[in-house]
Image: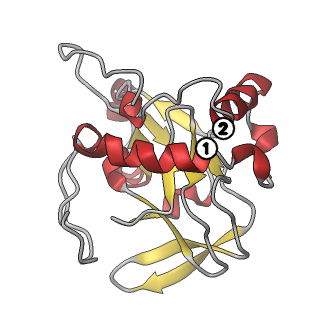
Amino acid sequence: MLHPDTEVRWISTEIGCGVLATRDIPKGTILWAMDPLDRTLSPERLDLLPPVCRDSLLKYSYRNRNGDYVYCWDNTRFMNHSFYPNSIATAYGYELAVRDIRANEELCNDYGTLNILEPFRPSEEGPERKVVYPDDLARHHRRWDEMLEAAFRQVYLVDQPLREVLSDSQWEQACQIAKGLIPMDSILNCLYRPAEDSPPTTSS
């Protein structure tokens, strides 16, 4: 489920629609959390879908660490990529605002965190990175971990409209990370690796 203080708007002919904040959202806010309405489909189930459904799922879903496709039921699927993301996925089934987001600012994550199937070159933003690769989690997880660790410190200090989507254990875990009582699991845990590969490390 996407943060309620957001809405879909037209961005441009090149980009299409995007998700914008309707009011200021502070750093450390949970911007998206997986909920019971989101669907998870295995690659085998994907192959059984009619082509038009399969194409839509491939366009609007991401792959989790198991290689399954997660299809978000709400406006989350319209969130665009940026090499300067203000929203980053955690290893816990939700995304955090990694900096303060102003009203009318677009919410973007880095598609390098989503286990994409093939490399793609997004719109020019000027950073050193020009292409998003399927294994970007292995390449860039340390930088994203640093941003997440800073955001986690604010989790229990800011308003959390999506708190009710999280289980009590998820929330307690988030608060313990925020207070430095337990270490944060690295975003590298989100990396999909084929069965023959070694598993990712569990901390940054």
Q: How many marks?
A: 2
User: In which image quadrant can residue 26 be found?
Assistant: bottom right
Residue 11 seen anywhere in this rendered image of the structure: yes
Q: Which residue is mark 2?
A: 178
Report the side of 5 relative to 43 (left or right).
right
| Spot occupied by residue 153 in the image (x, y as percentages of width and height) | 64, 45
User: Any mark on residue 34, and which?
Assistant: none
| Spot occupied by residue 12 in the image (x, y as percentages of width and height) | 41, 86
Q: Are marks 1 and 2 in contact (CB under 8 Å)?
A: yes
Helix, strand, or loop for circle 1?
helix
Residue at 40 percent of width and 32 percent of height: 190
Marks 1 and 2, Cα distance to the nearest angstrom? 5 Å
Q: Which amino acid is tagged 2?
A: Ala
Q: Which residue is mark 1?
A: 152
Residue 115 seen anywhere in this rendered image of the structure: no
Query: Badge 1 local density, few (<14 within 10 Å), some, or many (20+)?
Result: many
Q: Residue furthest front?
A: 180
